[in-house]
Structures are given as structure tokens and as C-alpha cells.
Image (cartoon, grey):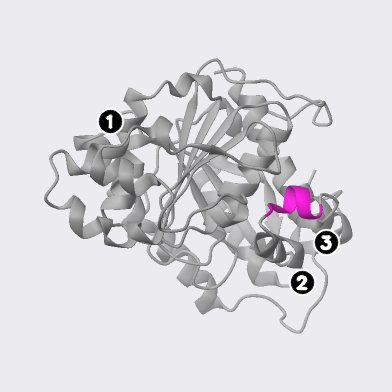
């Protein structure tokens, strides 16, 4: 498959070309030091290769209007403590694509910046009931969930700036690591097919709540030089959460983002990540795309802002991989 993919096609639908097919650029390839940095960053990262079928099954009939829906709600935490890796962008666009193909999807915005809420076009000013009220004031989740105006079947539990102080306020709360899990358990989440939890770029109590609340972890990894820094720390945190707070948690999906087909380094990072993590890495990669960056400023995902763009097509492919595997679980 990789050998038959041209570089132009790769930029369009998000597949990684083989090294031979990569377009030439000013760099001849990653230096030995760069390759060693990638391998060193991965050395201590341990992840279970018990994956959902979503990450390993071939995707068929991707152009069907409706994709298969999972038998039970899949609660997927999307986390990486490194900022700028496409975490919120991936949360929003995967959710949008799944909803556009028939799934009922809830996005829980746990990032105080509220970027996922902005991209979904929902209000999240200080007076709006938000996930802060759920975590700190024990407000029912049902009281804060609102529909995303642009896409049917897509809903959001918004974040407000109040959430910035939640890390400190949670310290004194009973069962501080499990507040989100308790809220999800008290709410009938089975009305949704997917719950995607967008985390802040840190490993504080908000992210721990997301890890305790989720059954699966999706890690976006940027195909760039420092992208793998801290990944080992994230995996160790996942192992601790799994051992003491949430034994069901597993790393089910790794999504390669911001792939630049003009650079050999991007191909090297992608190759090393695939070699280390194996089948948990989605076949589809997300290319760099101006349209993906522009969409949130219009209160939209790229799926509605420019559905024909390379970013939208790639996120659609990635969501299709997740959906067609989920039906077999």
C-alpha cells in the first residue's frame, strides 16, 4: 500500500509515502543524532498492544453515509501533555466526522482554554454552566451538555475559564481523581456512541480525571523533532492510573499528526513510532493543513469549514478506521 502511494496522494488523503516516494527537500534525511533522539524518547514508553479492533481492521465501504456504531459507548480520552500536537484539533474533527456519519457523539472539554468548545461553536463564557460546575459543584452532566450548532448528533460539555482554578480546588475534594467518572456514571452515556474527552496539555488532576473517566486513550503524536519528549512520562502515568484507579484503561490508538511530506524527518518519526507501537498506530496520518488551523476561528471544525481539504479528508479517514473497528467490539 505504501509503495503505491504517490506524494501528491499522501498530501490529499493523509497516507505516509515510502522513503523512496518522499519528495526531495533541502534536507537529505534525519541526522544520526535526530534518529537516536526519536529512539531514545520511545525507549522507556511501554504500551499494551491489546487494542480495540478499530486500530487493526481494514476499513471498507468508507464512503457509506452511515458507519457502523459500537455496541456500547466508547469513552476515549485524548491526551498528550506536550502542547501543539493537534490534540484538541483531533478531538473536534474526529468527533465531527463520526457524528456526520450517523454516530451520537459527546465532546467533553477539559481544557481551560476551551478551544474545543470554540471549534464546535458553543458558548463558553463565564456565565455558561460548564464542566467546571460538574467537577467542583457536583452539577449533573445533563445540565451542561449542549448541541453543536453546525453538526447534528454532536454535543459538547463546554469548558470555561473557571476551569483554570479547578486543579487547585480539586485537591481538597473527596475522590478528586474520580469526579468525572462519577459524573459519567450518573449520566446515561449509553445514549452516545462515543464520548471524546479533550485534555489540557499537562498531567495534572484534570488529565488524571480524564484518564480515570475513559476506557481508551488516544495519543496524538506530532511528526516533528521534539514530538516524543515526555511520551514515556505519559505512559508511566497511564500505567499508574491503570494499576490504582482505572484497570480498564488502555492505549488503543495513536494518531500521527502534522505530517509534512516534504521532510524526511517526518517519515523517520512516523516509521519509528510504528515500529515501536505497532498496530495501535492508525494507518492514516494527518497532514499539515492551513484549513485545519483556520476553521476554529469561524466556530467550525474543518469537516464543515472545508470538507474537501487535505486535513478534512485525512480526519475522515482516521475516524473511519475507528468506526469500522468499533462495530466489531
- The label number, if any, that marks residue 182 in the structure image: 1
* Number of other residues with Cα within 10 Å of mark 1, as a class: few under 14, some 14 to 19, many 20 or more: some
Q: Secondary structure at mark 2?
A: loop
For marks 3 and 1, the one nearer the N-term is 3
- Mark toward the viewer: 3 or 1: 1
Kind of element beneath mark 3: helix
Q: Is residue 136 visible?
A: yes
> Spatial distance from mark 3 to mark 2, Cα to Cα?
10 Å
Q: Is residue 84 left or right of residue 292?
A: left
Q: Does 10 sit above or below residue 139?
A: below
Q: Is residue 3 left or right of residue 32?
A: right
The residue tagged with tag 1: helix, strand or loop? helix
Q: Label 1, label 2: how many angstroms apart (C-alpha)?
A: 46 Å
> Residue 21 got which mark?
3
Q: Of circles 3 and 2, which is in front?
A: 2
Residue 207 spot, x, y in % from top left = 34, 50
Q: Report the residue marked by disc 2.
A: 262
Query: Disc 3, disc 1: CB below 8 Å?
Result: no
Q: Which residues are magenta?
A: 300-306
- Judged by depth in the image, the label closer to the viewer, 1 or 2, is 1
Mark 3 or mark 2: whose residue is earlier in sequence: 3
Amino acid at each position: 500500500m505504501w509503495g503505491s502511494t504517490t506524494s501528491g496522494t499522501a498530501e490529499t488523503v493523509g497516507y505516509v509515502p515510502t522513503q523512496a516516494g518522499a519528495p526531495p527537500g533541502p534536507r537529505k534525511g534525519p541526522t544520526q543524532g535526530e534518529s537516536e533522539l526519536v529512539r531514545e524518547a520511545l525507549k522507556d514508553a511501554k504500551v499494551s498492544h491489546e487494542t480495540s479492533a478499530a486500530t487493526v481492521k481494514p476499513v471498507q465501504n468508507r464512503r457509506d453515509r452511515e458507519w457502523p456504531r459500537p455496541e456500547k459507548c466508547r469513552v476515549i480520552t485524548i491526551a498528550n501533555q506536550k502542547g501543539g500536537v493537534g490534540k484538541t484539533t483531533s478531538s473536534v474533527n474526529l468527533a465531527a466526522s463520526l457524528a456526520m456519519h450517523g454516530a451520537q457523539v459527546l465532546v467533553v472539554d477539559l481544557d481551560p482554554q476551551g478551544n474545543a468548545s470554540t471549534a464546535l461553536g458553543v458558548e463558553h463564557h463565564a456565565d455558561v454552566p460548564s464542566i467546571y460546575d460538574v467537577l467542583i459543584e457536583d452539577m449533573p452532566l445533563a445540565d451542561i451538555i449542549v448541541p453543536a450548532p453546525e453538526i447534528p448528533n454532536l454535543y459538547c460539555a463546554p469548558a470555561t475559564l473557571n476551569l483554570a482554578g479547578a486543579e487547585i480546588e480539586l485537591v481538597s475534594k473527596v475522590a478528586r481523581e474520580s469526579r468525572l467518572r462519577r459524573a459519567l456514571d450518573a449520566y446515561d452515556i449509553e445514549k452516545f456512541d462515543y464520548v471524546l474527552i479533550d485534555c489540557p496539555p499537562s498531567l495534572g488532576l484534570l488529565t488524571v480525571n480524564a484518564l480515570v473517566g475513559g476506557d481508551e486513550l488516544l495519543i496524538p503524536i506530532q511528526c516533528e523533532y521534539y514530538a516524543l519528549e515526555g511520551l514515556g512520562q505519559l505512559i508511566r502515568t497511564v500505567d499508574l492510573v491503570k494499576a490504582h484507579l482505572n484497570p480498564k484503561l488502555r492505549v488503543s490508538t495513536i494518531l500521527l499528526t502534522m505530517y509534512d511530506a516534504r521532510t524526511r524527518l517526518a517519515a523517520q518519526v512516523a516509521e519509528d513510532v510504528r515500529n515501536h507501537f505497532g498496530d495501535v498506530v492508525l494507518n492514516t496520518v494527518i497532514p499539515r493543513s492551513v484549513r485545519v488551523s483556520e476553521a476554529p476561528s469561524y466556530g467550525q471544525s474543518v469537516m464543515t469549514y472545508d470538507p474537501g481539504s487535505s486535513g478534512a479528508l485525512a480526519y475522515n479517514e482516521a475516524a473511519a478506521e475507528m468506526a469500522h473497528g468499533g462495530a466489531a467490539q
